[in-house]
Amino acid sequence: MTVSADRVAHSRVAPLQQHAGDGRDTRRRSVLTPEGVALSLQRASTGSRFIALLVDLLIVLMLLIIPGIAIVVAIQAFDMPRIAAGWVFTALLVASFLLRTFYFAAFELRWQGRTPGKRWLRIRVIERHGRPLTAGAIFARNLAREAELFVPLSLLAAGGSAGVDGWIRLATLAWLGLFLAMPLFNRDRLRVGDLIGGTMVIANPKAILLDDMAGIAGVGGPAERFRFTPAQLQTYGIYELQVLEEVLRLPEGPVALDTRRAVAGKIRQRIGWSASDSQAPQNDTEADPRPFLEAYYAALRGNLETGLLFGRRRLRQAAKGSMPPSL
Amino acid sequence: MADDFRLKSTVFRQEREPSWRELEALVQRWESRGLRGLSATQALRLPLLYRAALSSLSVARSISLDRNLSDYLESLSARAYFCVHGVHTAPLAAVRTFFFRQFPDAIRQSAWAIGLAILIFTAGIATGLILTLINDDWFFAFVSSAMAGDRTPDSTTANLRAALYNFDIKLTDMLKLFAAELFSHNAGIGLLCFAFGFAFGVPVVLLLFSNGATLGAFVALYASHGLTYELLGWMLIHGITEILALLLCAAAGLMLGRAMAFPGRRQRLDALADAGRTAGRLAVGAIFLFFIAAVLEAFPRQLITQDHIRWLIAVSSLFIWGLYITATWRGRKVDSTDAVHDGIS
């Protein structure tokens, strides 16, 4: 392995930095529920929204093309009168308008702000301020799509026929470009329809509940074999605690083992801990750093959480060399 | 001894975890199968468990430093929040509420915008009418050659009259194609008007004015041949409905334009979203009106060739729409979410 364990540890836990400082993750948005609790949600990425749109458009196209082909075949096969063919063609034209206008709105009404494409990409529409999503907002955001997308697209498509000259096509392209690029010009990636409807598209939250690391270490666990002095628990803050949690949750493997050894070594050195402080032999801690880390995690968390109850929230470790603050 | 190692946050988690797991299972069923996936008891448990989860989240934020736990609670609360505070309108009920309450209400609420749209449209008609009456050549400034066809100032009175009465009609496929295309085309223009409101409403004014001028130029052309009554019968039989729809779309666009230009004390985006709610209703209702107008245009106008009956239909459509807009449907339940919503905003 050419990369040092320290570097690995750093790169593995890098995503955590987004959590530690609240302002750092540019994709998180806070939404206040009617109960008055702020929930932090992640806005959907532009790419997933674009793909969801393509999927939906493809479905609309299929819904139009398949009956269309079937009807043409039926007319050919059964030699239907021309007047019937006319009705059918009319019905298809009307259906294309109704479908492209109401497909999105109907699904978002029925499926809690999700169309099939959005459902597939695990994104959904919400009201920007956390209020209930109303039918009015859904219709507003989807009707705007007509001007954002369908009208310029049909103008472009009509470009081949007579009556539409080059300048108009150029203006259309500029307009299409401006509307399509709209989400890139604002922080919440809102398109024109979102602006009018007061909505926002977010990624579905999907965190699963893992084991409590402090619970594992606790009863009958490693915590009983290691002892730490109050000074040793004053060294680190919440940020380091959560990095340690991440390190403990790494999937088992050689990388995880290397990372844990490096982290355990750093902690031992920093807090001045030696094997004589515990009932566990030194070489045991070297071979498997996990019990030591779990015990330290549980002890540090207990210390920091006690601090929380007294209104002390220590976010980061104390600067190296300075004396830890006394309790 | 062993109890010493159990942190407060660990105990908290052990006590509450069963209710989180129960909520998670319910939310999962909801997400895959909707409300139908839940029994009555489960449906009643869901909001209770949701509030319990929110309370757990608040507690966890203040006493627990377990990152995974707060992430999980955050995500669980958000998922349950979508179930509890999501869209709760049954499609059929939504349609009923829309036509009997929201749409007429939206029209009455936006009287100023509709008034302004009428003013601009009338100004367009007057301009087209007067200028064309003064000088025939103005006709070509307002009407494109494709639209005019053989109805120009050079046409004979007989030609102009013939364009109004299509005697050799059959229920051909051409007719219905015409209806469909018209519907799609007109509703498209209407929605364009709505969406253009985003550009401070300026394109709405232009579009409205130019459409009015075209209309005025046609009236002037026919008036100069003494065919005003006949032309208006031909035009208004569906025109009343179509112009009303156009005016509603334009009013929607103007409301958006005002919110963009003069947001008042609110943030521009919030003002836009508020206006967008009413404007969206106007636009959806207008699509329905465009549909009726297209039907009137394709069938009664082609089938009925007596001017008096055309006028009768035109006047009665004006009467019906007037009644629809001004009447209030008492006894209908207000859509509660929307009422609360409008109350907040």
Image: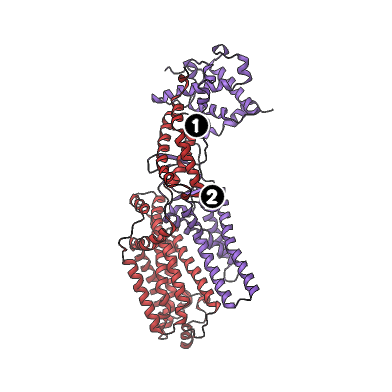
Chain colours: A purple, B red
Q: Quick check: B253 left or right of A244?
A: left
Amino acid type indicated by mark 2:
Arg
Q: Is residue B289 above or below residue A231?
A: below
Expressed as whole percent of the image width and height from the top left, the position of residue A288 reads: 62, 21
Q: Which residue is mark 2?
A: A119
Q: Which residue is mark 1?
A: B67
Along the line of sight, the residue nearer the viewer: B321 or B269: B321
Looking at the rendered structure, whether the residues under marks 1 and 2 are on a common chain is answered as no
**In this rendering, which labeled residue sits more in front, label 1 or label 2?**
2
Question: Is residue A205 among what the camera can see?
Answer: yes
Which chain letter goes with mark 1?
A: B
Along the line of sight, the residue nearer the viewer: B1 or B339: B1
Which chain letter goes with mark 2?
A: A
Amino acid type indicated by mark 1:
Arg
- Residue drawn 52% across and 74% down? B178
How far separated are the C-alphas under marks 1 and 2? 28 Å
Residue situated furthest top in the rendering: A276
Residue situated furthest right in the rendering: A1
